Amino acid sequence: MYTFVMDARLKKVRKERDSFRKQRDELINDMAEAKRKAKAFEEIKEIANNERLKGFALYDNDSFIDKLDFVFNEMEDNNER
């Protein structure tokens, strides 16, 4: 009888452990995604500073749009890995 109680407790502890591991892994993945987005934002900001665009002129500049497209495609490629 004592063995059954210990087995039940052990199962519960293992289940909690697995749950914590899953939460840890999800948090690590979320942090990696946040870092990728921050890097993309910095690249966009750098391009905008280099192009010296202000206001809505952003949408009239084909070069800037091409660069943004490149950055977003690069993000997608990195995300698929």
Image (cartoon, helix red, strand yellow):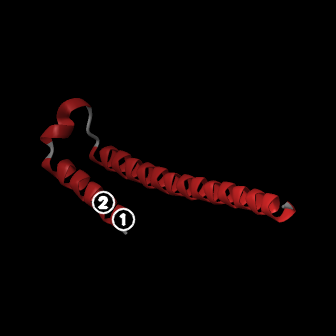
- Residue type marked 1: Asn
- Looking at the image, the residue that sits furthest to the right is 2
Q: Nearer the viewer, residue 16 or 68?
A: 16
- Residue type marked 2: Glu
In this view, 55 is above or below 58 = above
Report whether 50 appears left or right of 60.
Answer: right
Residue at x 31% of width, y 44% of height: 48
Residue at x 33% of width, y 58% of height: 75
As helix, strand or loop, the secondary structure at mark 2 comes to helix
Residue 1 place in picture, x, y as percent: 84, 61
Measure how far apart labels 2 and 1 are at the Cα level.
5 Å
Q: Nearer the viewer, residue 65 or 53?
A: 65
Q: Nearer the viewer, residue 17 or 63?
A: 17
Report whether 14 appears left or right of 49.
Answer: right
Residue with the mark numbered 1: 78
Q: Nearer the viewer, residue 34 or 26?
A: 26
Mark 2 surroundings within 10 Å by alpha-carbon count, few (fewer than 14), some (14 through 19), many (20 or more): few
Residue 19 place in picture, x, y as percent: 62, 55
CB atoms of marks 2 and 1 within 8 Å: yes
As helix, strand or loop, the secondary structure at mark 1 comes to helix
Report whether 70 appears left or right of 3.
Answer: left
Residue 40 place in picture, x, y as percent: 38, 52
Which quarter of the figure has residue 79? bottom left
Which quarter of the figure has residue 74? bottom left
Report whether 23 appears left or right of 34.
Answer: right
- In the rendered image, the quadrant that contains the C terminus is bottom left
- Looking at the image, the residue that sits furthest to the front is 1
Residue with the mark numbered 2: 76
Image mark count = 2
The mark found on residue 44 in the picture is none
Residue at x 39% of width, y 47% of height: 41
Residue at x 25% of width, y 30% of height: 55
